[in-house]
Image (cartoon, rainbow, N blue to C red):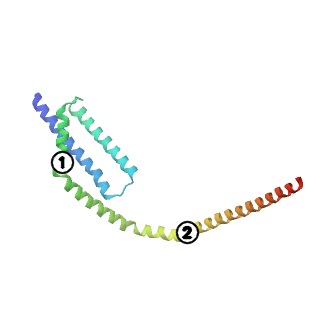
Amino acid sequence: MDNTTNQLYVFTIFIITGILTGVLFDIFRIFRKSFLTPDWLTRIEDILFWLLTGLLILYTIFNFNNGEIRFYLFLGIVLGIAIYLSTFSKFFIRINVKIINILKKFFTILFYPFQCILRFLRKVILKPISFIFINIRKNITHFFTRITTIFRKKNKKNHEEKKDFST
C-alpha cells in the first residue's frame, strides 16, 4: 500500500473514531436525560467519558498509525464527530431514551409488588420500632435533664450554705 492510500485509510479510521466518540458522548447524554443524577455523579460521568474517549483515541493512534500523531488524525476525529452529531445523534438519542423509558416502566411494574411489601414492612415493623426508640431517647434525655437540674440545685444550695458558714 502506498503512502497516500495508507493515509486515506488512517484518515477514514479516525473519522470512524470520531463517530464512536460521538456515540459515546450521546450514551452519557441519554443517561442524563433518562435519570436524575446528583452533581457529584455527573462529574464522575464526565471524567469517565474523557477517560474512555482518551483511551479510544490512544488505542486508535497506536493500533492504526503506529503511535504517530499527525494533524489529519485530529481533523478526522473532529469530522467524524461533526458528521455523527449532525446526522444520527438526534435519532440515536430519541430512540434510546424511549427504550429506557419503556424499560423503566417495565421495571416499575415488575417491582411494584416488592415496593408494596416494603411499604407494609415499614409500617408494621419499622414505624413501631422507631417510635419505641424515639420515646426511649426522649425519656432518657428528660431523665438526665431532671437529674442535672436536681444536682445543680443541690450544688447551688450547698454553695450557698458554705457562703453562710464562711461569713
Q: Can residue 1 be seen in this view?
A: no
Q: Under tag 1, what secondary structure?
A: helix
**Relative to residue 39, is residue 60 depicted above or below?**
above
Disc number at residue 140? none
42 horizontally vs 99: left or right:
right
Q: Which amino acid does label 2 sit on?
A: Lys
Pointer 2 residue: 127
Q: Which residue lies furthest to the front in this view?
A: 167
Residue occupying the point 28% across, 52% down: 29
Query: 165 and 34: which one is in front?
Result: 165
Quarter of the rendering containing residue 69: top left
Callout 2–callout 1 Cβ contact below 8 Å: no
How far is the residue under mark 2 from the one under mark 1? 54 Å
Residue 145, horizontal then vertical, whole percent:
70, 62
Please state, as top left, top right, bottom left or bottom right, where the C terminus lies in the image: bottom right
34 horizontally vs 136: left or right:
left
Residue 116, horizontal then vertical, whole percent:
45, 70
Q: Can residue 15 be seen in this view?
A: yes
Q: Are there few (<14), some (14-19), or many (20+) residues within 10 Å of tag 1? A: many
**Relative to residue 49, is residue 131 depicted above or below?**
below
Residue occupying the point 30% across, 57% down: 33
**Numbered label tally:** 2
Residue occupying the point 25% across, 37% down: 57
Pointer 1 residue: 84
Q: Which amino acid does label 1 sit on?
A: Tyr
Query: 21 and 109: which one is in front?
Result: 21
Q: Under tag 2, what secondary structure?
A: helix
Residue 59, horizontal then vertical, whole percent:
26, 36
